[in-house]
Amino acid sequence: MKIHQISLFAENKPGHIAAPARLLAQEGIDIRSLYLADTQQYGILRMIVSDWQKAAGILEAHGFAAKVTEVLAVEVPDRPGGLADVLEALEGTGINIEYMYAFPYTRGDQAILIFRFNNPDAAIAQLQTAGINLLAGDELLKK
Amino acid sequence: MNSLQQNHASALQSRDEAVDPAVYDAGVKLGTGDPGTPSTEIMETSAADCHPASMPDYTPLPELRNVQLQRLQAVVARAWQQVELFQSRLVERGLKPEDIRSLEEIAKLPFTEKSDLRDTYPFGLFASPMKDVVRLHVSSGTTGKPIVVAYTKEDVEVWTSVMVRCLAGCGLHRGDIIQNAYGYGLFTGGLGAHYGAEGLGATVVPASGGNADRQIMLMKDFGVTAMCCTPTYFLHLIDRAAELGVDMKELPLRVGVFGAEPWTESMRKHIETMSRIEAFDIYGLSEIIGPGVGCECRRHQGLHIFEDHFYPEIVDPATGEPLPEGTEGELVLTTLSKQAMPMIRYRTRDITMIFPGRCACGRTLRRIGRIGRRSDDMLIIRGVNVFPSQVESALLEIEGTLPNYQILLTREQGLDQMEVLVEVTAQMFNDKIGALQELQGRIQSALDHVLGIRVRVALVEPHSLERSEGKAKRVIDRRAS
């Protein structure tokens, strides 16, 4: 159920995302989704890629500060209130969203959101109980 | 004048009495610049070029050399008797105090290094029992441990007397209002300048460091005529005054006594143009006494060393061999009259030279050039000593942090700013912004704790910091003035 996401440290300066992006491209790795969390000084580039193990290996070998994190891909009905319903299922459980971002592809009438929870296992259980669909890695990467 | 002549006479009489403590005591009193109790009139009319307190600065050379030798022999004997480390080093070399028969033979004596002060922390180099010690000051050392310096009552008197001579040499006298913006406290700058200014009979405004707006208000409202602070702080005050609509050039301020950090001739010109004052470079270091080891006179042709108390040598920083006048090398100082903590051939790490020839002012005291650089990597930031190795040890204290860092020094509004760039390693890196900010905060507080000054911390990409020949370039100094 868990999706492997690559996170990369980058200084908040022009051109600092270009080098890792070029590197991944050269290795034929497709970036399926990305999100840049930034502060004034630096940013964290979070990516879902076609081959996370390869990507992590390449980035590490080239001296980037990269990390693999586990996130969840949650299907959310693509209509008003879709997100609110998902969040409601977590209310009162103490499960906290550390960050979230949208996945650019939809499946039918479902949007896909990427979540990092403070307690992913509890979140999986809670969401499944509420009948919310979580996607596995291979499902997510199918266009 | 009379008391001065008497002092010389007593020193000359006792010249042959090797290491009798009485000689030592006589030596201490000699040339402390105490002109007895001159009448107020004499002090007040001393706005002329030569202040009575400056008389020892003009001691004829044969007498000065005699006094220096007397004192050198006495201080070596004292250190031999009281300081274990010094005695053992002489024994290792097969030396005894009586082997020092001339000033040149000072070169036989072992050096004292800053590390000796650290290794014997806190009281290992004291030559006086605590009952005779009236003051302790603390300055930062090369690692987390500071160094401690001690003063007897007589040491404080000598310190005051040399500071009086510094200020007198800057053309200050009774009637001047001196604002002292050196930090008061463990740092020697504040109290050293304070005692000197009071000793001169001037009015002291003990403002201490910080609060520029208040400093400017005091300068303006009190009609302050002289300012003691670091040159960068004064630059900051100039800028701030302009913002507050105060024109420094219109104030009664006429003298600035600037030290505790290296500065340049171009900075002097800038200061003098912007504030219409006469700026003087003052030199000192806690290990020797604090401020007052040397100071410029009104000729501004180098800094006169008060060598009746502090004997200067220039040595090759690599080999330790003495170098002749006019050759650049490391300044080595010996305290000739210090009781509580004699420093014999202390390696200052300051690179300068002794100017050949006598100053046009007529002082017989030798002069050194402005301190432009240091032979080690010590940085002086806002008057505080900082070593790159301190940054290293602070980073190593934090779990997962490697000392891949660079120190970036800049000057903003006349104030030194220190930024520590730390490379983020894969181990340190965390996917959450909050965790990185927390890491940044931990590095910040570790550095604040070790360095004792506020620095900025920036996280940078791995391998992004400049390295030359595999060696990290630790310090980028952009404080050009």
Image: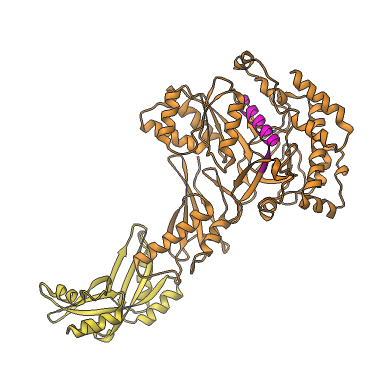
**Taking B224 as reference, is B102 above or below it?**
below
What secondary structure predominates along the stretch shown in magenta?
helix
Residue situated in front as seen by the camera: B9 or A134: B9
Residue situated in front as seen by the camera: B56 or A71: B56
Task: Give the x, y percent position of residue B466.
Answer: 50, 59
Q: How many circles with numbers are drawn on the protein?
A: 0
Residue situated in front as seen by the camera: A26 or B473: B473
Observer able to see residue B386: yes
Residue furthest to the front: B131
Q: Quadrant of residue B39?
A: top right
Task: Give the x, y percent position of residue B333.
Answer: 72, 41
Q: Is B163 one of the magenta-colored residues? A: yes
B393 with respect to B368 (left or right)? left
Task: Give the x, y percent position of residue A17.
Answer: 35, 66
B54 with respect to B222 (left or right)? right
Name the residue: 44% across, 75% down: A60
B228 with respect to B361 (left or right)? left
Task: Give the x, y percent position of residue B352.
Answer: 66, 40
Quadrant where the N terminus of chain B is found in the figure = top right
**Which span is picked out in magenta?**
B150-169
**Taking B124 as reference, is B174 above or below it?**
above
Q: Which lettered chain is shown in yellow? A: A
Name the residue: 78% across, 21% down: B5
Determine the colour of chain B.
Answer: orange
